Amino acid sequence: MALDPQLLDILACPDTHHAPLDYDAQAQTLTCTECGRIFEVRDDVPVLLLDEARGPAERS
């Protein structure tokens, strides 16, 4: 199951800039358009915790 498009419209990076996130359905990740942090989507639930985000250089 994919993330609800309405949810994707309101999700933002949890850092202070609150930039929009780009969803990669195949990789099941959300990427911040400003800082490049990558957030996992687990069981169709975005994990928007800064401590669990990967940096742009840590893509897998």
Image: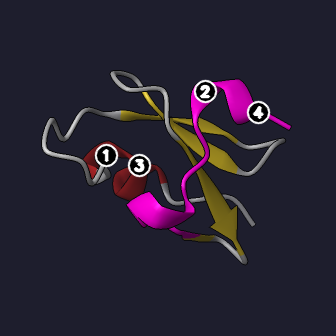
Viewer-nearest of labels 4 and 1? 4
Describe the element under mark 2 as helix, strand or loop: helix
Residue 10 locus on image (x, y percent): 26, 51
Which labelled disc corresponds to residue 39? Answer: none
Q: Is residue 50 magenta?
A: yes
Q: Pointer 3: what residue?
A: 8
Q: Residues within 10 Å of mark 1 (few under 14, many from 20)?
A: many
Circles 2 and 4 in contact, beta carbons < 8 Å:
yes
Q: Earlier in the sequence, mark 3 or mark 1?
A: 3
Which residue in the protein does label 4 denote? Answer: 59
Q: Is residue 18 left or right of residue 9?
A: left
Q: How many marks?
A: 4
Q: Which element type, helix, strand or loop, lies under badge 1? A: loop
Badge 3 amino acid? Leu
Q: Position of residue 17 (x, y in %)?
A: 15, 35
Residue on which disc 2 sits:
56
Q: Position of residue 34 (x, y in %)?
A: 33, 21
**Classed neighbour count for the residue bearing mark 3: other residues with Cα under 10 Å, few (<14), some (14–19), many (≥20):** some
Mark 4 is on which residue type? Arg
Do the numbered discs 3 and 1 sit on residues whose CB atoms are within 8 Å? no
- Which residue is located at x 13 percent, y 44 percent? 16
**What range is drawn magenta here?**
46-60
Give the amino acid type for the residue marked by disc 1 in the picture.
Cys
Q: Is residue 58 visible?
A: yes
